[in-house]
Image (cartoon, rainbow, N blue to C red):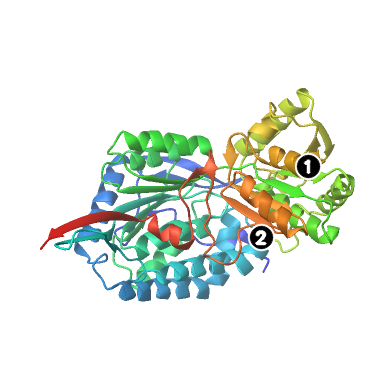
Amino acid sequence: MAFNPDDIEYKKLHFVNGEFRSDKDSSFDYIRPSDQKKLDSIPNASKDLVDETVEHAQQAFQKSDWSNLKPRQRAKLLFKWADLIEKDVDYLSKIEAMNSTRLISETSQGDVFATADTIRYFAEWADKIEGQTTASSPNVLSLTIKEPYGVVLGITPWNFPIVQVAWKAAPALAAGNSVIIKPSEYTPLSIFRIAELSIKAGIPKGIFNYLLGEGSVTGSYLVNHPGIGKIAFTGSSATGSKIMADSALTGLKPVHLELGGKSPQVVFDDIQNIDETVSKIAAGIYLNSGQICTSGTRLIAHKKIADELVEKLIKIGSQKLPGVTWEDKTSLPPIVSKKQAERIEVLISKSVEMGAKVISGGSWHDTNYGGYFYKPTLIENVTQEMPVFKEEVFGPVINIDTFDDDNEAILKANHPTYGLAACVHTSNLNKAINLSKKIDSGMIWVNHWGYPDEFSHPAGGFKRSGIGKDMGSNGINEYYKEKAIWIPH
């Protein structure tokens, strides 16, 4: 699947009411992650265009009868959209790889199909969300119904661009809302193809829209717009907190936030196959060069096996081959931007100054590609005051810690501020259940790392890791408001 990225055509335009639009109010540079080459100037959607887009989305919601279609009719259109996306795997996988830090081997075999299957999953929910009748006196009918919010704003991250469009748009559309997506300014190029295929599938104009732009410009206009009925965001905890605060100033819009994490990988000495466990731990930190909210960035291993685990992790990390996302041989993709690369350096250097010890990696690969490729890095002697413990690094960096007994493992696994995901590796079922209940994270994976293929698995965290859930029945219920009706008779 290797390809020439310069052969990939794309549109640097907004998509409003079924049409591609330009906007010359201001712009930002798009820098390709793999080689840090400036490809284009991308337009920021202006306040006027935001106003117009919200108005079109409101009118489409009210007048296109999207929310009033029979649920199965909405589902049919969403199924057709998913089929078109899947059939377009050759092109979509290439533009997604070129556009982001995702490897062509992963976009062609995973991301495009995950995008289509997410849409299918929520299409199947379209006619399965129901209200209820509630207990009342004999001469009263008390019931609830669920209704769409109207215009939903989805703000998506740069680490899985098209997959995250589906995570936000598919449940919102299945519930009968109209949608505006604001993709990350770091990865703005692949969404145009998703939009083209939405119209080809028959989704009415104005129901699916997107606006390009920086978060501080276009994102701010959208979050503060009074016509937005609901906000769904995936990204950093700091940005999520700001969105929540800003949204409260313009109509108390409900927000749904999937934010950062410092996920522990707790490994007991009773594991039956250490190589199999190490491969899962390695996936948890090296996939996408650690640029995943659920990356297992804290290894907490029983003292009896810690040294062997670390030795094997170092070996796997040393075999990761840095390279551009459009080459099949690449197994270590780039850090997304210069800003993020500099942030990784600062977090690690400050931690080392405070007493942390880098036992492997801790520097940049010297390549001719132009991008930033950070060596898989293991750090020990990390305390809770250090930046690499307190902050989400978003690089292939893992902290090493040990424990003697279950209580110590639980104490160390529970992070003071984050609670997105956690992994427990053990052959003892009772121990797995006990830790799953006592670790304060929204997702617990036993003898596994990573979001599973089953779309029914709710995704979301506690504390600074977010509010609400993506996926599963929780994921579609996020996009309905509930109305109570009281009828004396």
| Quarter of the image where one finds residue 485 | bottom left
Residue toward you, 417 or 346? 417
If the image is split into quadrants, where does the N terminus sit?
Answer: bottom right
| Quarter of the image where one finds residue 98 | bottom right
Which one is in front in this view, the residue at disc 2 or the one at disc 1? 1
**Percent of width and height locating residue 23:** 34, 46
Residue under the image location 79 percent in, 39 percent down: 401
**Percent of width and height locating residue 12:** 44, 53
Which residue occupies the extreme left position in the image?
Answer: 489
Q: Which sits earlier in the primary sequence, circle 2 or circle 1? A: 2
**Percent of width and height locating residue 34:** 65, 50
**Percent of width and height locating residue 382:** 76, 32
Residue toward you, 302 or 178? 302
Residue under the image location 42 percent in, 63 percent down: 170
State the residue position of label 1: 377
Q: Is residue 83 in sight in this rendering?
A: yes
Q: Residues within 10 Å of mark 1 (few under 14, many from 20)?
A: many
Residue under the image location 61 percent in, 42 percent down: 337
Which residue occupies the extreme front position in the image?
Answer: 138
Horizontal arrangement in the rendering, residue 9 relative to residue 323 (left or right):
left
Q: Amino acid at mark 2?
A: Trp
Marks 2 and 1, Cα distance to the nearest angstrom? 24 Å
Q: Is residue 342 in sight in this rendering?
A: no
Which residue occupies the extreme top position in the image?
Answer: 354
Q: Residue 189's mark?
A: none
State the residue position of label 2: 326
Q: Identify the element where label 1 is drawn.
A: strand
Q: Residues within 10 Å of mark 2 (few under 14, many from 20)?
A: many
Horizontal arrangement in the rendering, residue 201 relative to residue 61 (left or right):
right
Q: Amino acid at mark 1?
A: Thr
Q: Identify the element where label 2 is drawn.
A: loop
If the image is split into quadrants, where does the C terminus sit?
Answer: bottom left
